[in-house]
Amino acid sequence: MPQYTPPVRDTRFVLEHVVGLDRHADVEGFANATPDTVDAVLEEGGRFVAEVLFPLNQIGDLHGCTRADDGSVTAPPGFKDAYRQFVESGWGTLSAPEAFGGQGMPHVVSTAFQEYMISANMAFAMYPGLAHGAIAALVVKGSPEQHAKYLPRMVSGEWGGTMNLTEPQCGTDLGLIRTRAEPQADGSYSISGTKIFISAGEHDLTDNIIHLVLAKTPGAPDSSKGISLFVVPKVMVEDDGSLGARNAVTCGSIEHKMGIHGNSTCVMNYDGATGWLVGEEMKGLAAMFIMMNAARLGVGLQGLAVAETAYQNAVHYARDRRQGRALTGPAEPNEKADTLFVHPDVRRMLMEAKAWTEGLRALCLWGALQVDLEHKAGTDEERQIAADLIGLLTPVIKGVGTDKGYEIATTAQQVYGGHGYIREWGMEQYVRDARIAQIYEGTNGVQAMDLVGRKLAQNGGRAVQALFRIVTEEIAAAKSDAATADYATRLERALNELQAATMWFMANGMKDPNNVGAGATAYMHLMGLVATGLMWLRMVVAATALKTAGEGDAAFLDAKLVTARFFAERILPDAGALRRKIEGGAEAVMALPEEMFLAA
Amino acid sequence: MPQYTPPVRDTRFVLEHVVGLDRHADVEGFANATPDTVDAVLEEGGRFVAEVLFPLNQIGDLHGCTRADDGSVTAPPGFKDAYRQFVESGWGTLSAPEAFGGQGMPHVVSTAFQEYMISANMAFAMYPGLAHGAIAALVVKGSPEQHAKYLPRMVSGEWGGTMNLTEPQCGTDLGLIRTRAEPQADGSYSISGTKIFISAGEHDLTDNIIHLVLAKTPGAPDSSKGISLFVVPKVMVEDDGSLGARNAVTCGSIEHKMGIHGNSTCVMNYDGATGWLVGEEMKGLAAMFIMMNAARLGVGLQGLAVAETAYQNAVHYARDRRQGRALTGPAEPNEKADTLFVHPDVRRMLMEAKAWTEGLRALCLWGALQVDLEHKAGTDEERQIAADLIGLLTPVIKGVGTDKGYEIATTAQQVYGGHGYIREWGMEQYVRDARIAQIYEGTNGVQAMDLVGRKLAQNGGRAVQALFRIVTEEIAAAKSDAATADYATRLERALNELQAATMWFMANGMKDPNNVGAGATAYMHLMGLVATGLMWLRMVVAATALKTAGEGDAAFLDAKLVTARFFAERILPDAGALRRKIEGGAEAVMALPEEMFLAA
């Protein structure tokens, strides 16, 4: 049976030494995040998800969701009761604004908890996860009336929330949306159209579901500039807050998917449903991006979180399973065979998983810190740097986090040999679940294009220069200490490749924008290497300093140093290959006539 | 709905210009392989699999196999009738020895057909596929009586065949086998034990199934040197060839797997089943390797074959689906959006898939040629070179073919965006099916260890030197022609990395064998790049020569040249990164104490 233990010790190390939680004590909300409070969140929250949500993970996969003929959807066995406990415990309200009943904790702290929740049960975590995106959009764009009507019960988890963007003919290209919103005499709109791939679109966990829906008003232009955002409750909410009539929105079917079976992915039919404009007409895209950016960071976290559980189980299996002998002679001569752990290629797989999961954990939490600082840091400059960094890093965290998440889940499955392919062992579910994260909330190719086509050049390249400055400064500092110089020098090599690739884009993108597009994915991964490499640099510096001071758990700190070395020797070398691929440019990518792709 | 068209034009190009079928006309069996005959096999065989087997692929995935309480197993709807047609058409007997009812065609020709069959329906292809391994072992190790009794009806496909190696406690490490074989007075053995993961172990496609089973005789040593191979028919075969009593072997259960649902993966219980020794007692490992090597090449082919179907569908989808606009401005201004084909990152994905599938097709067929030459070439020297090459390349074809196969299937699924995750579209099945090929018949880590721990040093490195010589000579020849020099120079760079990595192993493997083990997988992929790169070099040389001569289909030849350039610019650069990873050595891989792998 699969196991899961929240990696509290590692999270704590990252919050303390990479994120530097105490260095931001003057930022709003951070005073709430005392070491004791954070410890309580990690320990108690971790225990809750491990004990209540993780045991439902395989059940959710096996049973999936069920739609009845009336369009109602039932979540897998146990989900409803677990959701009730989740709401009662308040774990979903950590970083929500206190004005709407939240606990006002830093986003970085709730992100640490989110990781555990996804690790325990990704499909379950998506129910409140999607609501968070809807909440984020309503907080910023909603009217005071909408705030009062919806937010307290969405924040508490009493009601669910969804994001309705995709239609059969339109995924990435939201200009193609056909859902219409007709204004009514009372100021509401009548919404009609079909939305697909709506996660948590219909279920029995909550009494109401607040749908945020992209649609076009009459005469709106036929592009993404014509989109407006509407709030459409499943059940009408009366002015006194009581639930009224059922709105004309129904689940037409639920999808049969590769994974995340425990979450209901719905086709939603809007048949003249009553909705209200959120923010301004035809400014829906900006509102959508508020939801979307939050969701993208959450999806990057999914990559890491699923990989973490898969990795933990691979470690347990490698310690238990005996097969073959160490190359250097029997490690345990009294046993019939040694454990998988003696085999260097098995260790190589586990080290890759460890180096990436710990590196991505730091990157996700450092990214979450920027979300806090973007809104709450003390100075304009700090807020701008944070906004620049998170704008730049969002596609990297989403794209690299999920590509590596899938890769690690696959690697962890590989450690199990044949048993990894068998459903009961649980490993193949992680691979199937992790796979969606590379696709939804903008495919990873879309992330890469967002990075190179939008974020890189924005404000004269201010964001990427800010990142380069941070990495350069921290490398220089680390090079001045003999104990950290080797790692810093290796990271510097990767940084040089990234800078050279950036220059290549600048020199060649004007000639042909396809030169940038053709290298987009490679560039995203190159930046992911450097950003994750920066996280490892911070861990190396912190571990070295603690060891010198005789503080901390020496075995844990040594493990950090070994894993950083593995990251430098075995993962960073990809930087050179990625740069060379980028410099290949567009020609070989674009030259082939369409009809020649099939060799038949 | 998914589509599949056998890539006949490409196969023909490879057989003619990479494999050089006509250059081996004096080899036994090759005289049968006239261009007309080969064309007929490719065209007619391709049509058969596309029309009869491919329509059952999704059905097989959806329905799976069903085991009744009596242990009988029913294949998915339609499989039995399709199997009957397969046997009647004779497509399974192409390269089987004429002495046993086969058509005596070269293995390389039947391999070309095998690819199509797997592309059409991998789970179906495994039924006759597993029988082929059993046939190969019986042909070499079986007695004349066993030949007469079993082979004609196994070759015809009237009976199935299986390979029974794995047990719950023993996968890679066959020394741990517990299945016992007790000699009986009549010269037979009584076989008792449990075998797991037995593909096609029980089904309703054939009247009999001939199991080849590894077991230990009394007093046999507790290692792989104590293993013997036995033939155990499901139904006893009387001396007159008629079917007798049911043997004491039953299917205890069928596994719930991630994919290949159409093939029954069985737990097989041997309860004093009657079996007969195949070959000598305690020489079972050698017999097993005959089955295994054939199976490994077949599994490598599975990687390519599933990737091919996934790729074809991704091309169709990218041509049909309209989303967004070209970076260089609308390609089709009269449409609401351009097709996915205009987006460089989509093309990048498709080109990666094309470059790998065509390269691996050539490599699989060139490997298959070595199997022919190993046994049938005219001189000792030719046979030895072929044997060396295929020994070296078998783990590369299996390991790299299936790692890339899975990667390409995943990439093709990615082209579909959200639809790729939905079962009805068919793409996620290819990913789930392709996944097993990295695991079974020896995990890819085991392949890598076979390559670096066994094949590399065998006979003083004779095999790897033979490969280096071929690649070096063909590069030198191609560099002397301006039209092919650029590609050759890029391949030479990758060859240099491979040679340097090989030297590094020689210099550092003696100090610590883990230095070799820690780099095994990277080395396997590095050799895969060079071997596939050699295939592309041959295609470049052939396409260039044909164009110069004004022969062949110019568009097809141009496509080869563009795809080769993509391979050189976008795939070969990985060679440098792989070498650097190898040179990282064992330290960072082996340093971490077991108990420090979990950060919790």
Image (cartoon, coloured by chain):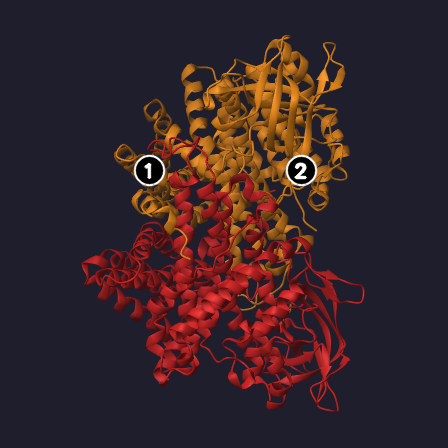
Chain colours: A red, B orange
Q: Secondary structure at mark 1?
A: helix
Q: Tell me if A109 is positioned left or right of A125 in this view.
A: left
| A515 versus B251 height, above or below | below
Foreground pick, B50 / A277? A277
Q: Position of residue B318 (x, y in %)?
A: 60, 56
User: Would residue A276 be visible to someone looking at this image?
Assistant: yes
| A510 versus A63 height, above or below | below
Count of numbered labels shown in the rendering: 2
Q: Position of residue B519 (x, y in %)?
A: 36, 41
Please name the amino acid that badge 1 sits on: Asn
Foreground pick, B451 / A452? B451
Count neighbours of disc 2 (C-alpha within 10 A) and say few if under 14, some if 14 to 19, many if 20 or more: many
Please name the amino acid that badge 2 sits on: Ile
Q: Which residue is mark 1?
A: B514
Q: Position of residue A119 (x, y in %)?
A: 52, 59
Question: What mark, if any, has residue B254 been given in the picture?
Answer: 2
Mark 2 chain: B
In terms of sequence position, does the residue under pointer 1 or pointer 2 come before the other? 2
Q: Residue at x 45, y 67 (%)?
A: A42
Q: Position of residue A594 (x, y in %)?
A: 57, 53
